[in-house]
Image: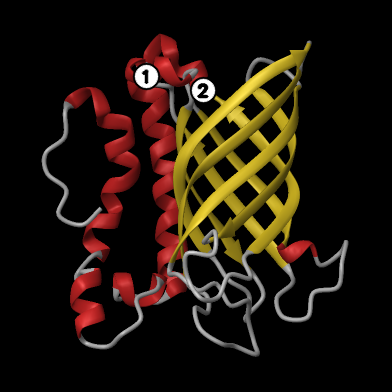
Amino acid sequence: MCGMGRERSDQAPIVYALKFFRQYCPLSLRKLESNGVQPNLRTFTGVPVKKITTTLFSGLMSAALAIGVTSGAQAADNEVRIGVLNHEMSLLRDSTEEDGVDINVEVLFDSPEWLAWAWSPRPHIGATFATHDDATSFIYSGLTWDYNFWGPMFVEGSFGFALHDGETGKSTVGNELGCTWNFHESASLGYEVTDAHRVMLTFEHISNASLCSENEGISNVGVRYGYQF
């Protein structure tokens, strides 16, 4: 996302959602690695994680507003979501390292025509903010597919990538995530209350598919509310 060039005007909603990242990319991953620094969400941006999460939240809300202004008649295909997740599903199982409550914020965009061949997934950008001091937060982006299978009921799946601020090596205070970049997947079962309002039960997971030496991953589950523009 650093050094992005000038984008086409028809990509304006996505560019608007991402442009605030540019000011927080003073260092490249290559420079960090050459200096012996393991890049993560904090070192990659050069600013504290709390400032990143605050800026990201503001950026996502601004992006949602921009979608409503710029998307016109197709705006119903864009959506902003917010939810509460149980970190590492600690209420359902024993969690020896990370637990607590997470806040999830996500913006989904109208599926572009060039993705019609892939069953028209919607691009998304989002973040999961851990409220517990020792728990991992992450930002993510990818594609989302959904399907109405019975009246207002729908199922949804997504796939993409995440950048986290957690532990990559051996650790006694947090999950050992191995790579700074992880895969991000989620699955939801939802209900369309009205054309604009949706609620869903969501499971999300990040891990590196054993591409790095450590791969404990993180799994969260919770509820989310979505508003379609």
Seen in the image, is 144 located left or right of residue 134? Answer: left
Can the viewer see residue 27?
no
Residue at position x 38%, y 21% in the image: 115
Which quarter of the figure has residue 25?
bottom left
Q: Is residue 83 left or right of residue 5?
A: right
116 w.r.t. 146: above or below: above
The structure residue drawn at horizontal position 32% and vertical position 46%, both measured from the top left corner, is 18
The numbered dot on residue 229 is: 2
Quick check: 190 above or below 76?
Answer: below
Q: Residue furthest left?
A: 6
Q: Position of residue 212 (x, y in %)?
A: 47, 70
Give the residue number, with chain letter if any, for mark 1.
71
Q: Residues within 10 Å of mark 2 (few under 14, many from 20)?
A: many
Any part of residue 85 in sight: yes
**Disc 2 and disc 1 in contact, CB within 8 angstroms:** yes
- Amino acid carrying label 2: it is Phe
Q: Secondary structure at mark 2?
A: loop
Q: Is residue 54 above or below residue 62?
A: below
Relative image position of residue 215 (x, y in whole percent): 58, 70
Is 54 drawn above or below residue 169 in the view shown? above
What is the distance, in whole Å, between disc 2 and disc 1 at their CAs? 9 Å
Helix, strand or loop at mark 1: loop
| Amino acid at circle 1 | Ser
In front here: 197 or 32? 32
